[in-house]
Image (tube, rainbow, N blue to C red):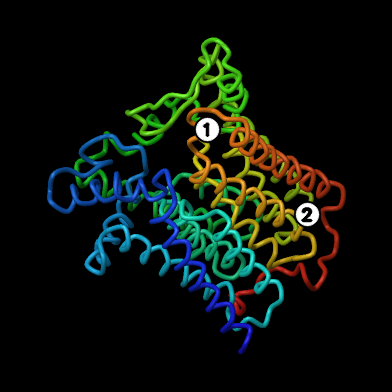
Amino acid sequence: MSRRVVLWVAFAAVHLGVAWLGFLMPNGPMGDVYNVYDPWSAQALTGAGVVGVTEEWVYPQLALAPMILAHAFAWISGYIVGWAILVTLVDAVAFAVLVGAARSAGRTTAAWFWLAYTALLGPVGLYRLDGFTVPLVLIACLWLVGRPWLASILMAVATWIKVWPAAVLAAALIAVRRRGAMIGGAVAVSVLTLAAIAFAGGAEHAFGFLAEQSARGLQVEAVVGTPYLWGALLGLDGFWVYWDPGIVAFQVTGADIDPVIAAMTPILAVVAAAVALLGGWAAARGARFAALFPPLSLALVTALIVFNKVGSPQYLTWLIPPMALGLVIDRRRWVLPATVALVAALATQLVYPLLYDGILSPALLPVAILTFRNATLVALFVWMLVRLVRLLRTPSAPATPSSAEPRESSC
């Protein structure tokens, strides 16, 4: 059996297994699909209102597109299965682009990493909107050098579905030489999207998702919420976990938490800007795309997680495109960060959905595992910063054969 066939058999087994586990595991890992995606899309299809157009919404407006597309497969066995099929199909397209003829050791390693990561993270990576955006961003990453217009368009579309791909797009604007193509594709998608929103009568809600996110408290899994979760575990006065029905999430509170909540969005913006400036400095000093883009994109993505008031488990899917591209370009330098990411994915699945009751009513083992998971994310962020700083010292180091830029013919 060829290497390519083995990879595709593994792809099918992992996706079928993860989809099936969604029906077996506790604490509703498919909850967003049947609680919000199905009702929101059904509301739009029946003319009862369009979220993001007729009312404020927590997501950018294009997020409704995959929710509606999933109905095309709902006839098979309901909307949940339809969603799983849709995400699997998009994953399959990205997997085909990544694997190709399976002759590249780097691409094969990246493919195995993606499959292992998907299995270790579990159903939350499949049954969330983030799972639809990851393959779009991965394809875009592979096309950045040879097809920057298409890469930019894909990243911009993904950003108008979930905001996180903006971090990868920002890294691309810094690291890719054909910046005009990157800017042009993103601007074209944004202008068309905003024009469609305005034409539908939703101009006043065009950026409502930004206000919805900034008004949130600290989600229980967020990195910055870790000390408050320990306070709740230890029974300190004023520390506890609670359900916020408006946000539809469990959050944590504690003494003097309001200034922390107010500060996190500005801190996130400042940290992201600082990382971008560091990447821009390295680019100005001649850092190559192959050396600069993977650590810069991963630094920006992990910054979005580490300094975020929200810490949803599906956010771990954001690590996949930068990690996969790093393995494609230079698997020897990226195998250790990828291993750390795999450990973080496993810890995430242990916390949610398996041990989540021990987070909502804090117990020592689940809280300790979540703390460890959050520490690995901080470690990855710092690790990528160190790599960026090292690029400032040797920005023009010659690329080895394993670290050559992806070419258009191989993408």
Marker disc for residue 2: none
Considering every residue shown, the one lying at the far bottom of the view is: 1
Q: Is 276 positioned to the left or the right of 148 in the image? A: right
Marker disc for residue 359: 1
Mark 2 or 1, closer to the camera: 1
Residue type, mark 1 in image = Ile
Image: 104 above or below 45: below
Nearer to us in this view, 183 or 115: 115
Q: Which residue shows up at 78% across the image and 48% down it? A: 387
Q: Please provide percent x and percent y for residue 290.
A: 72, 62
Q: Please provide percent x and percent y for residue 211.
A: 39, 29
Q: Which residue shows up at 25% across the image and 42% down it? A: 51
Q: Which residue shows up at 59% across the image and 59% down it? A: 117
Residue corresponding to mark 2: 286
Q: In which quadrant will I find the N terminus? A: bottom right
Q: How many marks?
A: 2
Q: Please provide percent x and percent y for residue 336.
A: 76, 56
Q: Secondary structure at mark 2?
A: loop
Nearer to us in this view, 345 or 387: 345
Q: Is 315 positioned to the left or the right of 291 in the image? A: left
Q: Is 377 positioned to the left or the right of 359 in the image? A: right
* Crowd class of label 1 (few under 14; some 14 to 19; many from 20; radius 10 Å): many
Residue type, mark 2 in image = Gly
Q: Please provide percent x and percent y for residue 273.
A: 62, 35
Query: Residues at badges 2 and 1 in contact (C-beta under 8 Å)?
Result: no
What is the quadrant of residue 223 in the picture?
A: top right
> Is residue 314 shown to the viewer in this render?
yes
CA gap, disc 2 to disc 1? 47 Å
Image: 45 above or below 230: below
